[in-house]
Structures are given as structure tokens and as C-alpha cells.
Image: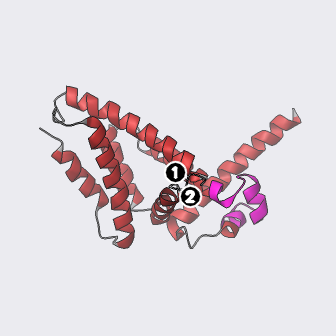
Amino acid sequence: MAKRGAYAKGVVKREEILEAALEIIGQRGYRSASVREIADAVGLSPAGLLHYFGSKEQLFVEILRARDEHDSRQFPDAGFEESLVEIIRHNAQVPGLVELYTRLAAEAGDTEHPARAFFLDRTATVHAAAREAFLAEQRAGRIRADLDPEWIIRAGHALADGLQNAWILDPSIDMAADIERFFTLLRP
């Protein structure tokens, strides 16, 4: 029974850490926020904080996972296209998380990096949802029937990620508007 209580407390503390990290990194940035600052926000030492994640890299992966879970709850069931545009619009409000995502996405190219499995799983999940939505829209006649869903999904994903990279360099770019233009090109 004691293990159960300790486990439950550990889960709660881990969630507290992720909430603090989302806020701190979202507003201050990946490079400006330190493990010490996140640890201080939740009353832990840096070593104590990393105990919950194993490593700094795994902490960052879990921050991105938590960000995705928040986005899913904040922008539910509006339809794939609408949800994606709203998430991208929201991303402009949390520049540090966009920076963290782009950095870890690049580092995930290393087969040994802790973020690799996260990005592979995330891509499979996002592409499956996009495929389902795309095919439903094609059947309903709202997306051109001559378009190959797999190619459009890859191109759309590359566009979204590329826009985030460009936006980091030039925050005047309206990522959501560019994604909306892309969806317009898919219509009959």
C-alpha cells in the first residue's frame, strides 16, 4: 500500500514539473530556461527533478509530450484542419516550445537520441489522424479526389515543421495563415 501512495505522489509531482516546465520554456525559451529554474519552481534540486525523468533530454521529450496532450485537450474535435490551424496559431504564443520542438526534431535524426522514438510515434499518430480526416474529406467532395493522401500528408507535415523553423527566424510569418492557404489548394 505504501508503494501505491508513493507512486501516486510521484505521478503528481511529475505532472507538476511538466506544468511548470511548459510555462517556463513556453515563455522564456529553451535556451533561457534552465533545469535549475524548473526545479526551483517545483521545490526540487536539479538532481531531484531529473530523478523523475532520467535525463535532461528525456525531460525535454516529456515536455513535448505534455504539450501535445494539452493541445489535444485545448483544441478537441473541431475537425482536423481547424484543430491544426488553432494549434499553430497557439504555437505563436509559446515560442520557447516551438524552439524546443524544432531543436529536438533535428536531434531526433540521431538514431540514439532519446527524442527519436517520440518523434516516430508522434508522426505515425498525426499521420494516421490526418489520413482518416483527409479520406473523409475526399469522400465528402471537400478535397480534390485526384490528390494522393500520403503525399499531401507528408507535404503538409513538412510545411508545418518548415514554417516553425522559418517563424523562429522571422516571427512576422503567420504560420496559421500559410497552413490555411495550403488547405485551400486542396479544395475542388
Is residue 111 something one can see in this rendering?
yes
Disc 2 crowd, CA 10 A, few/some/many (<14, 14-19, 20+): many
Q: Confirm or deny contact between disc 1 and disc 2 (CB under 8 A).
A: yes
Amino acid type for the residue under numbered disc 1? Arg
Image disc number at residue 22:
2
130, above or below 49, in the image: above
Queried whether the magenta region covers residue 37, the answer comes back as no
Q: Position of residue 95 (x, y in %)?
A: 45, 65
Q: Position of residue 31 (x, y in %)?
A: 56, 72
First to last magenta residue range: 38-59
Q: Earlier in the sequence, mark 1 or mark 2?
A: 2
Query: Going 30% across and 59% down the picture, which residue do you hit?
Result: 175
Amino acid type for the residue under numbered disc 2? Leu
Queried whether the magenta region covers residue 45, the answer comes back as yes
Disc 1 crowd, CA 10 A, few/some/many (<14, 14-19, 20+): some
User: Mark 1 — residue?
Assistant: 67
For residue 72, side relative to residue 157 (left or right): right
For residue 180, side relative to residue 99 (left or right): left
Residue furthest toward the front? 111
For residue 43, side relative to residue 17 (left or right): right
Query: Going 45% across and 38% down the picture, which residue do you hit?
Result: 125
Query: Going 34% across and 70% down the picture, which residue do you hit?
Result: 171
| Quadrant of the image containing the N terminus | top right
Q: Position of residue 138 (x, y in %)?
A: 21, 30
Q: Position of residue 134 (x, y in %)?
A: 28, 34
Residue 48 image-quadrant placement? bottom right
